[in-house]
Image (spheres, helix red, strand yellow):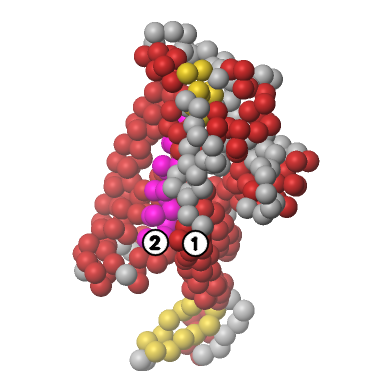
């Protein structure tokens, strides 16, 4: 079952294909522009390596330097000595570093590694969830082209951001040894550029997706029963589910809460020219990392369930149609609403080839 989605409009106008194609073109143009700007910034930063140092620390007064030389410390600064070198350390920055290295990084390894291990173990013990009844060959329309294009755009950007974020957090422990410092330096620069410039695009598209899908992700009473039975894993018989089941709704509201929190903190880090202090950006970095690592772990489960884990789930998000048997077993309440709108595979092929009014969706009634 693909969990990111939850709404199928009553009609899909003929302009839907053009609109979806327009979204893809807009995303590609934005990517090209952002990447070109990003490489320009990398070149400028390399040409002026001291710029970060000049902007990272406030001006130090003579009295503060005298205090440092005397060995005195206070709440903001302390003197550290190593091989006769004297370094001024910002205490809040040191706190941020300790939280990031001692808590956030291990948290990321635990939740992501744990999720991968649980999924692998579940697959080896339980295996893929196959349909209990044979396919009927009759199809129900579930996802219009616009929502499919929007979903895949958000999903693709999420994967790129997750990989680049993980590289920035953990890559220094792996890739310098494997590929050398030169390749690792290039990987880091590319990851920074991609992460910083694709993040805002992801945030905008995520908001559009959440707004488009909110109607069918409102919690209902039967969702409680879905959770009690573990989505059908506990007990016998099928659990009731509408267009979106309880698990899909949890994923939706995680994206609507934690996901938007990650986007907001990312904007704080991406645009440091709105008066936010260095301390604010440090906390934004912690919030961003914790939220993103948690979402990445849950997303791995989402991807598994929507692809390898459940027979027939991926078809809906690739073709727009699902088999009657799949709809009956996984979303029986929705199936009862739209079962009289099922069409044959030949009719689906004819609609997609334009031989009939294919753009009028056989969707559920309002």
Q: Residues within 10 Å of mark 2 (few under 14, many from 20)?
A: some
Residue in view at x 55 percent, y 41 percent: 132
Q: Residue at x 53, y 83 (%)?
A: 78
Residue drawn at (47%, 50%), measured in percent from left and top? 128
Give the crowd class for mark 1: few <14, some 14-19, many >=20 residues within 10 Å.
few
Nearest to the eye among marks 2 and 1: give it. 1
**Is residue 18 shown in magenta?**
no
Q: Is residue 153 magenta?
A: yes
Q: Closer to the camera, 39 or 333? A: 333
Left or right of 291 in this view: 215: right
Q: Position of residue 17 (x, y in %)?
A: 42, 19
Q: Taking 230 as reference, is 183 above or below it? A: below
**Residue 248, percent from left and from top:** 61, 43
Judge by depth and name the residue closer to the eye, 175 or 362: 362
Q: Which residue is mark 1?
A: 125
Q: Which residue is mark 2?
A: 168
Residue 133: x %, y % from top left: 54, 37
State the extent of the magenta-drawn residues as a range: 147-167
Front-lying residue, 146 or 199: 146
Residue 254 location, x and y as percent?
Answer: 62, 48
Quadrant assignment for the N terminus: top right
Secondary element type, mark 2: helix
Local SS, label 1: helix
Mark 2–mark 1 distance (CA, rounded to whole Å):
34 Å
Residue drawn at the location 49% of the way across and 85% of the way down: 79
The disc, 2 or 1, on the residue closer to the chain's N-terminal end is 1
State the image quarter where residue 45 is shown. bottom left
Describe residue 181's horizontal placement relative to residue 201 as left or right.
left
Decide if residue 158 is in sight here.
no
Image quarter (top left, top right, bottom left or bottom right) of the C terminus: top right
Q: Is residue 96 above or below residue 127?
A: below
């Amino acid at each position: 079952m693909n969990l990111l989605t939850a709404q199928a409009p009553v009609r899909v106008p003929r302009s839907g294909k053009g609109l979806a194609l327009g979204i893809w073109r807009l995303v590609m143009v934005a990517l090209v522009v952002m990447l070109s700007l990003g490489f320009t910034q990398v070149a400028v930063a390399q040409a002026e390596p001291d710029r970060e140092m000049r902007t990272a620390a406030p001006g130090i007064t003579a009295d503060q330097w005298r205090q440092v030389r005397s060995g005195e410390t206070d709440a903001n600064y302390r003197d550290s000595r190593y091989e006769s070198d004297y370094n001024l350390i910002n205490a809040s920055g040191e706190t941020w570093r300790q939280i990031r290295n001692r808590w956030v990084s291990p948290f990321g390894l635990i939740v992501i590694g744990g999720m991968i291990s649980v999924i692998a173990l579940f697959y080896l013990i339980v295996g893929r969830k196959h349909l209990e009844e044979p396919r009927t060959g009759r199809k129900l329309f579930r996802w219009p082209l616009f929502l499919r294009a929007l979903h895949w755009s958000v999903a693709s950007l999420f994967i790129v951001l997750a990989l680049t974020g993980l590289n920035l957090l953990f890559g220094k422990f792996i890739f310098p040894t494997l590929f050398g410092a030169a390749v690792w330096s290039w990987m880091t620069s590319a990851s920074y550029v991609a992460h910083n410039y694709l993040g805002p695009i992801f945030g905008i598209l995520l908001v559009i997706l959440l707004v488009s899908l909110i109607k069918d992700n409102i919690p209902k009473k039967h969702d409680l029963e879905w959770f009690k039975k573990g989505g059908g894993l506990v007990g016998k018989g099928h659990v009731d589910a509408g267009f979106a089941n309880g698990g899909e709704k949890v994923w939706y509201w995680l994206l609507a809460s934690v996901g938007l929190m990650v986007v907001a903190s990312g904007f704080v880090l991406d645009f440091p020219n709105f008066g936010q202090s260095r301390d604010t950006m440090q906390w934004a970095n912690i919030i961003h990392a914790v939220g993103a690592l948690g979402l990445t772990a849950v997303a791995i489960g989402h991807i598994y369930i929507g692809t390898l884990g459940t027979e027939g789930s991926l078809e809906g998000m690739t073709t727009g149609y699902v088999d009657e048997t799949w709809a009956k077993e996984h979303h029986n309440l929705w199936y009862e609403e739209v079962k009289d709108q099922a069409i044959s595979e030949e009719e689906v092929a004819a609609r997609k080839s334009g031989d009939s009014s294919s753009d009028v969706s056989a969707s559920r009634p309002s």
